[in-house]
Image: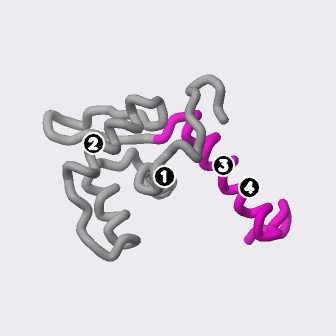
């Protein structure tokens, strides 16, 4: 648990978790991702269309909880980025999962 934000990874719904991972993956590929880039990224994993309303409600919710930064690119386009809190949650979760399957430090690919 991250005490500063009061948010635990286990408190997030699967779709919220997937959004955090998607935003983080897209950030690593370049600039701050826009909502439609996040949608496109997730649709390849979900093998189906993601409802715009569901997407943006959840992105806004994660921003309100301090897990995403939301900025305006222009009047119609928002950009998103993971916060330090989100990055800590994602890293801690990845480490727990790696430990659970026997991947330790140098064992990771």
> Of label 4 and label 3, which has the lower sequence position?
3
> Of label 2 and label 3, which has the lower sequence position?
2
Can the viewer see residue 27 in this picture? no
Q: Which mark is residue 17?
A: 1
Q: Secondary structure at mark 2?
A: helix
Q: Is 10 within the magenta?
A: no
As drawn, 2 above or below 34: above
Q: Position of residue 76 (x, y in %)?
A: 14, 39
Q: Is residue 106 left or right of residue 65?
A: right
Residue at 39% from the left image edge and 45% from the top image edge = 32
Residue at 36% from the left image edge and 64% from the top image edge = 41
Give the quarter of the image for residue 26. bottom left
Q: Is 83 within the magenta?
A: yes
Q: Position of residue 77 (x, y in %)?
A: 20, 41
- Colour mapping: one colour
Q: Is residue 78 left or right of residue 33?
A: left
Judging by the rendered image, the residue that carries numbered circle 3 is: 91
Identify which residue, 54 or 29, lies in the foreground: 54
Give the quarter of the image for residue 78. top left
Q: Secondary structure at mark 1?
A: helix
Give the magenta range: 82-109
As drawn, 68 above or below 6: below
Judging by the rendered image, the residue that carries numbered circle 2 is: 57
Cβ–Cβ under 8 Å for marks 1 and 4:
no
Q: Which mark is residue 96?
A: 4
Residue at 20% from the left image edge and 53% from the top image edge = 52
Quadrant in which the N terminus is drawn: top right
Cβ–Cβ under 8 Å for marks 3 and 1:
no
Tell me the distance, in whole angstroms, between the alpha carbons under discs 1 and 2.
Answer: 14 Å
């Amino acid at each position: 648990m991250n005490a500063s934000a009061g948010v635990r990874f286990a408190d997030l719904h699967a779709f919220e978790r997937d959004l955090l991972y998607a935003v983080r993956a897209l950030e690593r590929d370049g600039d701050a991702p826009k909502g439609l880039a996040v949608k496109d990224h997730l649709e390849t994993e979900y093998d189906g269309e993601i409802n715009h309303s569901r997407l943006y409600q959840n992105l806004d919710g994660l921003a309100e909880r301090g897990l995403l930064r939301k900025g305006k690119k222009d009047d119609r386009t928002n950009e998103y980025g993971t916060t330090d809190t989100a990055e800590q949650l994602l890293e801690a979760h990845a480490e727990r999962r790696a430990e659970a399957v026997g991947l330790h430090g140098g064992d990771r690919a």
